[in-house]
Image: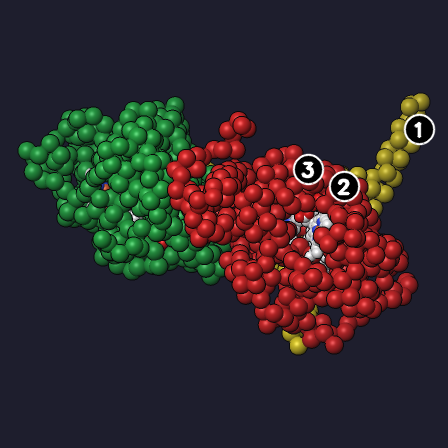
Chain colours: A red, B green, C yellow
Amino acid sequence: FQKNQPAQGRAFEPLVEVKAMEPDSSVWGKNFPNQYDGLQKTATNNIDTTYGGSSAFSWLERDPRQKILFAGYPFSKDYNDDRGHANALEDVRATKRLNLNDEDPKHTPATCYSCKSSNNPGLWTDMGMAAYDAMTFNEMTPNINNAIGCANCHEAETMRLIATNPALIEGLEAQGKDWTTFSRQEMRTVVCANCHVEYYFAGPDKYLTFPWAKGTQIDQIISYYNEIGFKDWEYPDAGTPMLKAQHPEYEFFTAGSTHYNAGVSCADCHMPYVSDGAAKYSSHDVHSPLINPEQACGQCHTDVEYVVRRVNTIQDQVANTKIATEDAIIDAINAIKAAAANPNSDAALLDQARQLHREAQYMWDFLSAENSTGFHNPEYALKICADATNLARQAQMLAAQAANDPSLLKTGTYYAPAQ
Amino acid sequence: FQKNQPAQGRAFEPLVEVKAMEPDSSVWGKNFPNQYDGLQKTATNNIDTTYGGSSAFSWLERDPRQKILFAGYPFSKDYNDDRGHANALEDVRATKRLNLNDEDPKHTPATCYSCKSSNNPGLWTDMGMAAYDAMTFNEMTPNINNAIGCANCHEAETMRLIATNPALIEGLEAQGKDWTTFSRQEMRTVVCANCHVEYYFAGPDKYLTFPWAKGTQIDQIISYYNEIGFKDWEYPDAGTPMLKAQHPEYEFFTAGSTHYNAGVSCADCHMPYVSDGAAKYSSHDVHSPLINPEQACGQCHTDVEYVVRRVNTIQDQVANTKIATEDAIIDAINAIKAAAANPNSDAALLDQARQLHREAQYMWDFLSAENSTGFHNPEYALKICADATNLARQAQMLAAQAANDPSLLKTGTYYAPAQ
Amino acid sequence: MNKLTIPILIAVAAFALAMGAFVWATDAVAYAGTHPETCNNCHVMHPMYENYYHASHEKWAECADCHLPHENIFAYYFEKGRQGMHDVYVFTTGQTPALIRANERSQEIIQSNCVRCHEQTVESITMGAQAFDRNCWDCHRDVAHGERGISTSSYQDSSLYPVK
Ligand SMILES: [Ca+2]
Ligand SMILES: [Ca+2]
């Protein structure tokens, strides 16, 4: 039925038959012990790199500006770096961002399980995604007992890579794309887009949606959100209708990066071939390629030491520029707050300021929530910083104009001692 | 005498003996006809690329913002793209930037010939660079009768690549570097730094100087200029002490670009090997590598079409971001002008605004005057845009604070109809 | 017969046996030949073989043409033995590194071989007062082992999943 993937025998006889969408990876593991072992290893990984790695260190501690930037939103309470796939369930259940009071209209929906468990493909097929998403997180919990597993990426019968998340299928359709026509190499990137993408919850029933109808570039996503008038939260005291970006690895990488344009896929770097005796297989121990650069980068680059040094250069440059952008946004926030508190402020100008704050911060977040510290697309990262800083400064200027108060133009307010 | 270059015979017998620093390239050409032919070809090149190429198109027409940015300085009168080496003399004599009135204290000095002629190495040796630079352009003209030639790059006896410009030797020495210890591969970049570098004229006698004592990165150069209190001109009505950046290809490329870090030299791309029968030699027809990418890039990159497409992506991104920076600087200029016209403005704040305008515009110019539209170092280019925009917006904000006038915060003033 | 003869004979026999087993187990005799297939005997050499086979020099040169010195026959066989024993030792003792890279000595050998065959072509660029201080493959990155160098994986072949 899938146009791109003709039925095809495996090179060997499976030991056990795995039923469609089997949530338990250990069953698949009987046929494919190397892959299963790899997936298991992601549970205990803990090596860190300069900017990433596998421990769940806190971003709010590492970069306290983010506490200000996310004020009023659960991300200001708890925001850690990601860990290996096998931890997904434990981590989503443990985060302080959850609101488990089902009476509260802002309670966490079941949708938050969407990218954390291999039970999902089966549940979505049985009950439909709309019904799944309409449940609360608490209500869904008993149905979920496996972390990410084989069923999230593979079709059991053929072991093909597939789109399992209905939101991905719909997100592609909205752009007129049909994933079943994709080549194998494309699927080695698209399979990650089941999860490593920007998303939002549409409507009161929290329907999982990827904001891709206008395209997956940052300005297209922003104009999509503006058009539907969506906001994730309102910034306290400033009144800005904010957007939160989440792990847009797929959108960021595919926006003309050098590796994407050269035909490189996520799996090339994050799941390089390794050998076990004579058998070659894809490493399912997915983590930062800087932990095993010989395998991850050495397959294409002869001078591995050089490319790793290069990653450092790029990440340092992005990390520093990102901080300058954060400072500009914080200056804007403080100015908008003051202008909003001033009853004489011009409402129209203030709204313009808020709109620019909204866009500047979303742009910054798009880059910041992307987990490679710019490496997946260095020039895009720096261009986004340049644009976001420009908008943030203009937001501040508009706030000062709204309040007709040049004293709101102070810069470096993050560093100023709190009054 | 040169530590890195042990005396050693040539592989073949020269036909004629070329005397040291021979200014006439046709004499050298008798021994090396291929190289001489190449140099000759640079006279008639006229193919243009999207952002560069060999015709002398006007930057002021292509990007009229530059007329505003250079207001009050000769660059606002005439500023063309560079052409091939053989045109250097014709072009320097023809530019409307010259001031040939020797009575005017602002007359053009002989220093302007420094990078345009193969007569220079001989003249510098005979009279010393200080005496050379103290003459006027008019006075020097009779001594100069050859455009750029072999003597600018080679030592006649050995054909080694050498530093011929005393300003380069001194600029390196100021950083504790001795060019005679450089390897051959390093010289394939450093020989271009005889000319393709940022420079200024020190003191009343216009002594040619490279501002490298603190290093060749942009912030090091800015802090050098700030420390010596140098300015090229004062921005009309704004009163900003401005700096003009000139063709800092060397500084830009060597600031950690991916190709520089990988050991690639200017000559690798701009003077690729070509073959004459069985033997290969360096193309001396120096121009944009996008005109012959198979040779220039294909030696290292198999997929030439891919890398050329990549250059386009990078240049488009840089060109667009650069325009946003120009807009921000123009907004700042207009605000500073207004604040300067306001007798009640706070002088200290206004000076701070000017300082930021000076730095923002120099940063922008460093990127803009660099002739590869960012390709020589894409991330550096975009980081510089981000920083320059940030400073320009802050300059505008300080001007508004100085005049205590939020109406100076208007943005997009370049697009506003002139009053 | 000296009273040491028997122990010596035993020692020699044991040594011969051990060497024989070693040679048999590792297929070390393979090193005597020059066929690229010989090097490919060793599965860790397979990527280099595979990529070499598809690169431009397969028509002209065998592994040994580039990887062994050719100044004279002694240097050739000495290096062949030295390098061969080293590879066999590393391989049989399971110390094969994740990433096999030519060491400095090999690089010098390879460079001298490039120049040996292409002397005429490169004469005018390698000549002069300054040492030619780069490797030919700094530019010609793919002539020897193809685009993918020592890649253990080929590009994912999209034709395996033909569209429609
Ligand atoms: Ca992580
Ligand atoms: Ca040109």
Categorize mark 1 by other alpha carbons within 10 Å: few (<14), some (14-19), many (20+). few
Give percent across and percent down for residue B414.
Answer: 30, 52
Q: Is residue B127 above or below residue B374?
A: above
Q: In this orientation, which residue lies closer to the viewer: B393 or A378?
A: B393
Q: CA distance from mark 1 to mark 3?
A: 73 Å
Which residue position holds label 3?
A58
Q: Quadrant of the N terminus of chain B?
A: top left
Q: In this orientation, which residue lies closer to the viewer: B231 or A288?
A: B231
| Mark 2 vs 3, N-terminal side | 2
Query: Circles 2 and 1: CB distance less than 8 Å?
Result: no
Categorize mark 2 by other alpha carbons within 10 Å: few (<14), some (14-19), many (20+). some
Chain holding disc 2: A
Q: Residue at x 53, y 28 (%)?
A: A419
Chain holding disc 3: A
Which residue position holds label 1?
C6
Which residue position holds label 2?
A45
Q: CA distance from mark 2 to mark 3?
A: 17 Å
Give percent across and percent down for residue C21.
Answer: 85, 43
